Every structure is written in structure tokens, then in C-alpha cells.
Image (cartoon, rainbow, N blue to C red):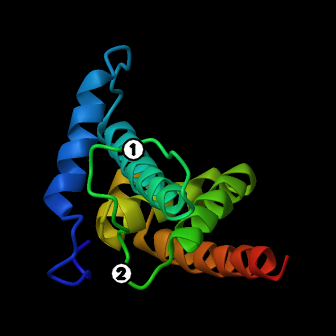
Amino acid sequence: MRHERRDHTLQASALVNEAYLRLIEVTQVQWQNRVHFIAMASRIMRRILVDAARAKRNQKRGGGGQKVSLDEALPVAETSIEDLVAIDAALDALEAVDARKCKVVEMRFFGGLTVEETADALHVSVGTIMRDWRLAKTWLARELERGHDA
């Protein structure tokens, strides 16, 4: 969110607030460690942003999309609603192939963690995170291109 325009309707504080509200509703989770918490928070933020995009897409199409508690704005100003939904589907496919690379993308893109913070959270080296990040971005770009051509 830190790279977004200032007048963006979905502010980082609103996203964090919504993620916090969802996290405190989860009562049956036994937090194992910081990594577990960060992974869950990143996943929840991803869900919030994708749900907001889907709701906005449904609204544009005249559908009766479910409302979310956030402003229905995209996290990335230049990203279309369809692109965000496609990114979500591509991330689901990446998770099936390589779960750690999916976690890296979630933590860096949705969670806003730095390379160093992600490496610390996943207990791997900075070099491993850089490699995973680079490979994940390439893999996702190919998946998105395939989906766009279909």
C-alpha cells in the first residue's frame, strides 16, 4: 500500500484494521510462532483485497455482490479488478506447486514485508527469498499471460 497514490480510497490502516478484526475472530488457532502469525495475516490481507475486487467487479456487472467492510477499491491503482482476481487464482496454482514461494509473495506483496523480514519470518536466507521472489514473479507472469490468452 505504501506505493499507492495518496487519494487511494483503501488506506493501509483500513486494511490492517480489517485484517486485525478477522484475526481476533479466529479463536481456535494456536499461534505457533511469529512466522505462523505473519503467514496468516498476509493470507487474510490477500483475501480482503481479493474479496473487495470481486465485490467491485460484481457491482460493475450489475450483480448483487456481497459487501465487504472496506471501501471497494483496489490495492494497486493501475491493476484492474480482473487482474487482481487472476493474480489470486495464479497464487492458488503457485501454492499447489511451491507453497513457500506463494508465502513469499503473500508476505511481500500483501503483507508488505521486506526481503529481510520475509527471510527472518520463514527462517531462510535473504538469497533464498530473493531467488523465490524472482522465480515466483516469473511463474506468476507466465500464468497470468496464459490466462489472458485463453
Residue 11: % across, % down:
18, 65
Image disc number at residue 7? none
Look at 52% across and 74% down and name the residue there: 133
Residue 7: % across, % down:
16, 79
State the quadrant of the C terminus: bottom right
Image disc number at residue 44? 1
| Residue that numbered label 2 is attached to | 77
Mark 1–mark 2 contact, CB under 8 Å?
no
Residue 149: % across, % down:
82, 82
Look at 33% across and 57% down and name the residue there: 120
Specify the amino acid type for callout 2.
Ala
Look at 26% across and 57% down and name the residue there: 71
Q: Is residue 6 above or below residue 42?
A: below
Picture quadrant where residue 8 is located:
bottom left
Q: Residue furthest front?
A: 62
Nearest to N terminus: mark 1 or mark 2: 1
Q: Residue furthest right?
A: 150
Secondary structure under tag 2 reads: loop
Residue 65: % across, % down:
50, 46
Q: Is residue 25 above or below residue 79?
A: above
Count residues near mark 2 (Cα–Cα under 10 Å), then give few for <14, some for 14-19, many for 20+. few
Secondary structure under tag 1 reads: helix
Specify the amino acid type for callout 1.
Ile
Toward the viewer: 36 or 139? 139
Toward the viewer: 42 or 116? 42
Count residues near mark 1 (Cα–Cα under 10 Å), then give few for <14, some for 14-19, many for 20+. many
- Would you say 2 lies left or right of 99 here? left
